[in-house]
Structures are given as C-alpha cells and as structure tokens.
Amino acid sequence: DVHGNRFALESVLKEIELEKPDLILNLGDGVWGSANPLGAWNLQQSCGALEVRGNTDEYVMAEPDSLEGSKSYTQWLQSQLTPQVAEHLRTVPVNRTALEGQILATHGTPNDPWTAFFNESYQQQLGRLAPYSGVKVVLVGHTHNELLEVQDGITRVNVGAVSRQKDGDPWARWVLLEQKGTRFNVTFKRVEYDVEAAVRWILEHYPHGEREAAQLRSGRA
C-alpha cells in the first residue's frame, strides 16, 4: 500500500536495505495516490520486489469513464504515469507464493484484491487457504491496519501500509519476516518520513490535493 507516495517509500526502502533481505514482497496498491506516483512506481520497480496486484491497481488499468466519481483523478494519474505502468499491472497476479509455498502474499484475499482477508471468519479464511496446503505465513494488505494472528500453525499478518495511515500516526509501515528453523518471526516496523515534502508535492502538482495532504499530515483516513 505505497499509494503513490515516493517520499514514504524512500524512507522504508532505506530501512529495508539495512536488513539485507533475501526477498522483498510488494502487496499492491502501488500508485493510486498523489505524492509523486511515477517516482513511487520507479522505486518499486527498481527494488526487485515480487509484486501482487491491489484493488486500486485495477483502477489504473481501467478507462477513466468507467470509474464513477474518479474520472478526473484517474485522468490526472494516468497523465503522471507512462502507458507501460498499466500494461505491467495487467501481468501482475493477485497472489504469489515464496519459500516453496511456505509464504502466501496477497493484497486482499488470495483470489480477490477487493475483499479484506481479516474481515472474514477464521473458517472462511481457511477455505481461502485450502489450495495452499504448505502455507505457514499469509501476508496481506488492503485495510491499512497492522494485525497478527496465529492459529493451527498458520501465521496471518496484515502488514499495514507505507502510506495513508488510519490510526493517527503518519509514519510509514512495513514488516520484517524472519525464518528461524521451521518458525517465523514477525516484526512490525514504523518509519518516519518527510510528510511535509510529500504534502508540498501534492499541492504543487495535483489540483485537488487538499484532502490527501490532510490525510498524510494527520495519519487518519
């Protein structure tokens, strides 16, 4: 959930680089935002992450006239991006596995980026995971709320969001996952970034950016 915020993503990637990870996973919703979306896109492509498609990534792929209430923003966003962004997003799957199937990464649920995984019952979650018999860790995004639950040997994590927080803390979020033998440790990370620089970019480049600027400053949707 970078949501087109280059400034937040830069700070997150600097922290990630210090950990020297074997793998970076990007859980989607990469460019639907106004704090330099093309810069955010370029950073995401340069870090070599495995990607999954988020629900707002599907907005980027759509024709502006098909998006009720979002036509003017979609036109602006597409003017900021290159045609190759939408072309690339069409090739990105809605879920990915890693570590020989031990990790499942998705934006919402494994087959639907629009549905929040943790809004479903545990039995519904298990039904979603049935095709992934070897999974030990499920990583999701979408709701921008950090969450960790462990049951029946499966660790389920909502990693939070790089941008557009909801809890009153504007800092960017990411998660460090570490394998220790047959188990995994999950560490939630919060990273300070230059919110005012992001706000200035929005107000200088997007004609109707006051709402997102206020959201980034306050850390509340």
Image (tube, rainbow, N blue to C red):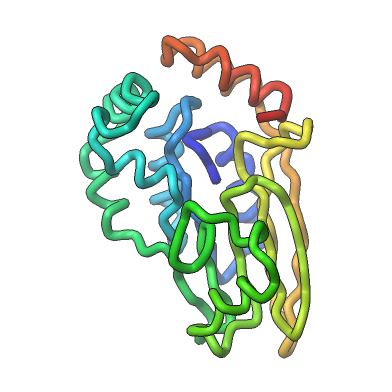
Instruction: State which quadrant residue 157 falls in.
Output: bottom right
Residue 143 position within the rendered picture, expressed as x and y whole percent measured from the top left: 62, 47
Instruction: State which quadrant residue 190 falls in.
Output: top right
Q: Is residue 200 above or below residue 129?
A: above
State whether residue 135 appears in this view. Answer: yes
Q: Is residue 116 above or below residue 139?
A: above
Apparent side of residue 202 relative to residue 214 in the rendered image (left or right): left
Closer-to-camera residue (195/215): 215
> Measuring 46% from the left and 44% from the top, which residue is drawn there?
30
Work out which quarter of the rendered image holds the C terminus and state it.
Answer: top right
Closer-to-camera residue (103/180): 103
Residue 66 position within the rendered picture, expressed as x and y whole percent measured from the top left: 26, 33
Residue 117 position within the rendered picture, expressed as x and y whole percent measured from the top left: 60, 61
Q: Is residue 96 above or below residue 53?
A: below
Instruction: Tally the numbered discs.
Output: 0
> Measuring 27% from the left and 40% from the top, which residue is drawn there?
62
State whether residue 43 appears in this view. Answer: no
> Measuring 45% from the left and 28% from the top, which residue is drawn there?
36
Q: Is residue 183 above or below residue 62?
A: below
Apparent side of residue 5 relative to residue 160 in the rendered image (left or right): left
> Measuring 56% from the left and 32% from the top, which residue is drawn there?
7
Instruction: State which quadrant residue 56 falls in.
Output: top left
